[in-house]
Image: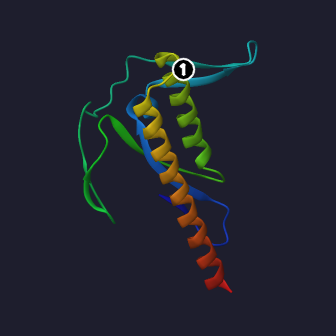
């Protein structure tokens, strides 16, 4: 889901499913170390969340009922460019996949990636058409 808070505002929002390991950061402190110039993560074990791992939710939307992805969280980001959060998550997941799979990848992974890219391209075209319709309606 993507949107804008109002027609005269620059605030925008986006939402998407993110792996639970990335979203469940309630017990994590993120800070910038000025000496080393690196971002440091400090995970505190004392804070426990009430979220049950492995839970499955049923989502209702324009496509009807569907089951939410397992061990994922729905994240809603708002700001001048909320897409950058999801871009960073995708980049991190890509780096992890490259490191754990040796960077070669198999045919099914490549096929799935191309299908996802095609879907993203179609969604981008739909968004562009909707933006044009909104601009035409404003005039």
Numbered disc 1: secondary structure: loop
Looking at this view, name the residue that lies furthest to the top: 36
Give x and y (percent) for residue 59.
28, 54
- State whether residue 56 is above or below residue 47: below
- Tell me the colour scheme of the image: rainbow
Q: Nearer the viewer, residue 43 or 56?
A: 56
Q: Residues within 10 Å of mark 1 (few under 14, many from 20)?
A: few
Give x and y (percent) for residue 46.
37, 18
Give x and y (percent) for residue 90.
53, 36
Q: Nearer the viewer, residue 87 or 108?
A: 108
Residue drawn at the location 60% of the way across and 58% of the way down: 12
Q: Which residue is mark 1?
A: 103
Residue drawn at the location 28% of the way across and 34% of the way down: 51
- State whether residue 59 is above or below residue 103: below
Left/right placement of residue 88 relative to residue 22 reads right
Left/right placement of residue 75 relative to residue 8 reads left
Q: Does residue 25 show up?
A: no
Number of labelled discs? 1
- Give the quarter of the figure containing the C terminus: bottom right
Q: Nearer the viewer, residue 54 or 50?
A: 54
Give x and y (percent) for residue 70.
29, 37
Q: Does residue 34 show up?
A: yes
Q: Quadrant of residue 125?
A: bottom right
Residue drawn at the location 66% of the way across and 54% of the way down: 80
Q: Quadrant of residue 50?
A: top left
- State whether residue 35 is above or below residue 75: above
């Amino acid at each position: 889901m993507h949107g804008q808070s109002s027609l005269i505002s620059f605030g925008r929002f986006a939402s998407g499913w993110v792996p639970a390991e990335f979203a469940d950061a309630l017990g994590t402190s993120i800070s910038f170390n000025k000496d080393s110039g690196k971002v440091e993560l400090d995970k505190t074990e004392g804070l426990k969340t009430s979220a049950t791992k492995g839970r499955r939710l049923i989502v209702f939307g324009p496509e009807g009922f569907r089951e939410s992805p397992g061990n994922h969280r729905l994240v809603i980001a708002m700001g001048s460019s909320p897409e950058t959060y999801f871009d960073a998550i995708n980049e991190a997941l890509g780096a992890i996949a490259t490191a754990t799979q040796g960077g070669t990848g198999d045919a099914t992974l490549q096929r799935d990636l191309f299908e996802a890219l095609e879907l993203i391209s179609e969604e981008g075209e739909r968004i562009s058409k909707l933006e044009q319709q909104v601009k035409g309606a404003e005039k």
